[in-house]
Amino acid sequence: MASILLPSQLDPLIRAPTRSTTPQPPRAVPHLHPTASSDTNIINIRSSTECPLDNLGTAIVDGLSQPPGSKSLPALLLWDEKGQTLYDDLLTWPEYYPYRVEAELLNDKIGDITATIALSRADILVELGAGNMSKSSLFLSSLDKRLHAPLVYYALDVDGAQLERSLAQLKQCTTLKWITVCGLLGTYEDGARWLARPELAAFRRTLVWLGNSITNCEEQGASELLEAFSRDPDTGRPQNLAGFLLLVDGCQDAARIELAYDVPSGKSRGWIMHALEAAREHLGGDGDSDVESLLADGNWRFEGRWHPERQRYENYLVPTRPLMGIIGGQLIRLDEGERVAMLGSGKWPEATVSAVAARSGLEIKKAWRNEEFQYGAYWLQPIIRRHDSGIDIAEMGESGKESTKRE
Ligand SMILES: C[S@@+](CC[C@H](N)C(=O)[O-])C[C@H]1O[C@@H](n2cnc3c(N)ncnc32)[C@H](O)[C@@H]1O
């Protein structure tokens, strides 16, 4: 059963968002939840019926049952504890430019970025897919210096062990005056549902998505996810959104991209191939000969491809011989050489980011760039709509309240 923190348990920061020009020390976060670690304050927001993590077995069978050309495996298979370790190892290879370039961009522009976020006067800051949180310390330290009121920072991730480790490390190496650090264990969708609860409606929130992670979604999916954080999924009413900070890779250089996603050391291949081991585990492979043989490492190889027309690099797993077996009561057949999509990484220039944002009612208000690598940090806020009556409806203006302005 999901453990969802009650708003009263977020007391006292969440209960009463008050702003003062007189600096006040942050109040201590109390014991949050029976399942929350007292050291790292991790709140489990996973929903047992809707969380994809609980249904990975079904998602695997479903993805492998699709017709040739449409088969896939769930990307979440890559983010278990071992997958996180393999990914973190990949980050250390110089050919994997996205991590290095993003860190440089943040280092160069952090003061301006956090000043912008501080001005947006949020009560809650959620970092989506926080993972190793290697950039979070720099980010929060800089933001903390620019705040004049308490703010609760939630690192959201799907992997509990990684979250626990990263939060402990962050707390050890960072001293914050205004910011209280907590964790949310769940998927992006869990996070959107959690933030949409009426009890949190009064609390202005900023969302931060580092690591080019938004582009793992296709453009339409990314817009839908942004919208899930901007509008109440049931009523369509705007959420109390201060803004979104997105870090997005816009590189279109095929050679550079291909080298980064298939590094000579083989570390990227190893990470993508790990999905097979994770899938066997999810399907309870031990003793099930169909699962064991269909998903055996030796029957698959890695393939990566840059698709310039889609501005997207795709990682595939490809059978090295014809495969057939029954998994979850379903007959699965794969041809030799048939691509199974594993994880994609979009490379979106500013125009694409702008289009993705616009479809979810957001617009780019500020951008910071690394021109050489076309890497961008984008600050998005809700679009102010002009209605036929001549009245501008600021769906969520700077004040965080719905406001109207007559011409
Ligand atoms: C590319 S890493 C980024 C880590 C870190 N934010 C950075 O910028 O280096 C992506 C992180 O997102 C998490 N993640 C992936 N899919 C997720 C999902 N659907 N919901 C929540 N977290 C997810 C993974 O567990 C992983 O820690």
Image: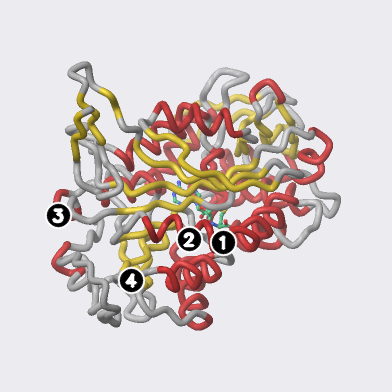
Q: Is tag 4's residue or tag 1's residue first in the polypeptide sequence? A: 1
Q: Position of residue 391 (x, y in %)?
A: 20, 26
Dots 3, 4 in contact, CB < 8 A: no
Callout 3 secondary element: helix
Q: Which residue is mark 3?
A: 199
Separation of disc 3 and disc 2 at Cα?
27 Å
Q: Which residue is mark 2?
A: 114
**Dividing the picture into quarters, in which one does residue 394 lie?**
top left
Which disc, if any, is residue 254? none
- 349 or 40: nearer the eye? 349
Separation of disc 1 and disc 3 at Cα?
32 Å
- 121 or 49: nearer the eye? 121
Q: Is tag 3's residue or tag 2's residue first in the polypeptide sequence? A: 2
Which disc, if any, is residue 110? 1
- Residue 129 placement, left or right of 22: right
Separation of disc 3 and disc 4 at Cα?
24 Å
Dots 1, 2 in contact, CB < 8 A: yes
